[in-house]
Image (tube, rainbow, N blue to C red):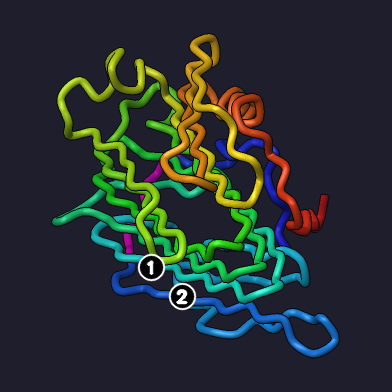
Amino acid sequence: MPKVPDDPLAEIGSAPPTGGWTGTEVSVRLRRGAGGTVRVDGVLCRAPVWFHWDGATLWLVGSGASPVGEDRIRIRVDVGAGVAVAIRSVAATLVYAARGTGTRWDTEIHVAEGASVDWNPEPVILTERARHEATTTVHAAGGADVRLDEVLVLGRAGEATGALRSTLAVRIDDAPALLTSIDTSLPAWSGPAGVGNCSVIAHRLRVGPEKDPAVTADASRRAALLQPAPGCRLAVVAADDVSTARRSLDAVLTADLLSVIRPKHRGR
C-alpha cells in the first residue's frame, strides 16, 4: 500500500496530463459474512481509479491523472448491516484542465442499518483551467452511523481557481434530509456572503443516533453547524489552508464515531 502523504499538496506537479477517461465506474459492496469477516466484491478497478481493502480500511487509489478533459467518473460504495469501515484515499485529487463539457465525478454511498462509515479522503484541488461538477449522494438507513468529510482547495498556490459546482445530497430512510451545494458561477460566490475569499472550503456530515446539538456558528473560525433534519448534522468551514479547515471541523463537530474501525496507515 502506498504511503499516505502528510501534506496533500506535496509532490503535485504543475504540468497537466494529456489524456483522460470517460464512462469510468467502480462499485464496491461490503457485507459481513460467517465468523464476522467482511466480504468485498464488485468492480473494484477501472482506470483511472481502483479500491484496495486491507481488512479495516477501503483505500481509493488513483492509477492515472484525472479528472481531466471530459472525464466522467462514478463511484458507488454499498455498506451492509453490521459492517464498520473507514474509507480513505492515498493522495489528493487534482482536477486538471477541462475540455468540451468539462469533467464530472459522482459518488454514491449506501449505508445499511447498523453499519458505520467514516469517509475522509484527501482534499480535492481545483486548478485554474478546471471546469468540474461533483455530486456526493448519501443513502443512509435510520440506524446507520455516518461521518463524511470533504475538503476542497480552490486553486494551487499562486493560482486562481477553476469553475466548480459541487453538491451534497442526503436521504435517510429514503426521505430527503439535506441538499446543499457550492457553485462558482453564482454572483459574489467568493465574497462575504459566500466563501469570504478563502481558498479552502470543507464540510463534515454526521448522520447517526447521537443526540443532536443545537444549531451554532463560530465566527472566529468562519464555521457553522447546521441541523437540517433529526439525526443529520452538517459542519461547514472556510479557511486559508487545509490544516486549519480540519481543525475547525473538529472544533465545530466532533470527529468521534460510535463504532467505526479506525484506518490502518500502511507504510507510515
**Compared with residue 254, is residue 88 higher up or lower down, i.e. above or below?**
below
**Residue at 54% across / 71% down in the picture?**
50
Q: Position of residue 16 (x, y in %)?
A: 36, 48
**Compared with residue 107, is residue 179 higher up or lower down, i.e. above or below?**
above
Q: Which mark is residue 44?
A: none
**Residue at 55% across / 67% down in the picture?**
111
Q: Position of residue 163 (x, y in %)?
A: 24, 38
Which residues make up the magenta segment?
A: 14-20
Q: Position of residue 171 (x, y in %)?
A: 41, 59
What residue is shown with label 2?
26
Q: Which mark is residue 74?
A: 1
Is residue 264 toward the left or the right of residue 26 in the image?
right
Looking at the rendered structure, the number of numbered marks drawn on it comes to 2
Graded by Cα atoms within 10 Å as few (under 14), some (14 to 19) or many (20 or more), the crowding at tag 1 reads some
Q: Is residue 167 magenta?
A: no
**Residue at 41% across / 40% down in the picture?**
228
Nearest the viewer among 51 and 10 is 51
Query: Can residue 263 be seen from the camera position used here?
Result: no
**Compared with residue 219, is residue 66 higher up or lower down, i.e. above or below?**
below
Between the residue at mark 2 and the residue at mark 1, the CA separation in whole angstroms equals: 7 Å
Nearest the viewer among 2 and 136 is 136
Quadrant occupied by the N terminus: bottom right
Q: Amino acid at mark 1?
A: Arg
Query: Can residue 187 be seen from the camera position used here?
Result: yes
Is residue 42 toward the left or the right of residue 161 in the image?
right
In the rendered structure, are the residues bearing label 2 and label 1 in contact, judged by CB atoms less than 8 Å apart?
Answer: yes
Q: Quadrant of residue 119?
A: bottom right
Nearest the viewer among 210 and 240 is 210
Q: Provide the major secondary structure of the magenta segment.
A: loop
